[in-house]
Image: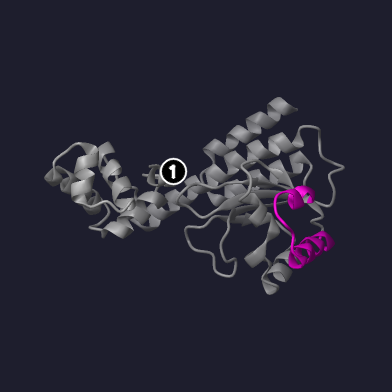
Amino acid sequence: MHSKFYEDINRFLSIQDSGQLQERLEAATHDLGFKWYAMGHHVDLRGSPEDALRLSNYPSDWIEHSLAERFYASDPIHRASTRTATGFLWSEVSSLIDLTRRDHDILQAASRHGLGEGFTVPAHVPGEYRGTCSFGTTSLDDLGRRALPLASMTSSYAFEAGRRILRAERRTAEPSGDVPLLTDRQRDAIVLVARGKADPEIAQLLGISQATAHEHVENARRAYGHAQRPYLVVRALFDGQISFSEVLRR
């Protein structure tokens, strides 16, 4: 059974569109013993940005109720996902965050709509919206012994498939939206710009002339459509060209 499941997980690698992703994710959800799934970035659900991933088969009455009550604005599961790098059961969320009265109200309301228990896996990529993949059910009684580790694997593959599809859709809608190819020196220069360094300091830190340092930054700006330096940093972070850890490292 598990070898078949690993084969099914690998199928996420060849998924080409969101329809296929939804079908595969729904099948995996039921194979794991869960009833519901919700995968996506943590954004305002009333008007999700085009570059945000949102897939779910949660009960429609729960979705309508949570939108009406704005539960997404203070979702305790989303908050808890920022405190751990591994998946967690909803029943254990109080070990990750201090639950408020509203948090308890949200969890109780979810339970009344058939989402009494679940498992959430964080999916946080530097430069992108925070995200999660959650599997919900009424109880854990129908889950197999290895359901949670397999759910973690499924989440990783499914979320990456969703990111890949989003990037492809953006390239189709905006041909100029491809991530520019930067040199290592250009990336180094952007990191230093992000740290607030001017050209003379960049030159000194990289062991190059000021003119060369300026050229690296200007070439990177041109690659991003002559973006001003603050926007260049934001775009480079969003595209994964540089990381927050590089910027914050001293």
Describe the element under mark 1 as helix, strand or loop: helix
Which residue is drawn at the image coordinates 72% and 27% (left, top)? 2
Q: Which residue is mark 1?
A: 245
Residue closer to the observer: 112 or 104: 104
Count of numbered marks: 1
- For disc 1, the neighbor class at 10 Å (few under 14, some 14 to 19, many from 20) is few
The amino acid on which the numbered mark 1 sits, given as a three-letter code, is: Ser
Q: Position of residue 156 (x, y in %)?
A: 59, 40
Q: Position of residue 188 (x, y in %)?
A: 29, 41
User: Is the residue 193 above or below the residue 212 in the image?
Assistant: below
User: Is the residue 45 above or below the residue 222 in the image?
Assistant: below
How are the colours assigned in the image?
one colour
Q: Position of residue 232 (x, y in %)?
A: 30, 55
Residue reaching furthest to the top: 3
Quadrant housing residue 4: top right
Relative to 62, 154 lies left or right? left
Query: Which quadrant is the C terminus positioned in?
Result: top left
Residue reaching furthest to the right: 141
Quadrant housing residue 77: bottom right
Prevalent SS, magenta region: helix
Q: Is residue 6 visible?
A: yes
Which residue is drawn at the image coordinates 63% and 42% (left, top)? 155
User: Is the residue 65 above or below the residue 6 in the image?
Assistant: below
Q: Start and end of the magenta stretch? A: 91-113
Q: Position of residue 153 (x, y in %)?
A: 64, 36
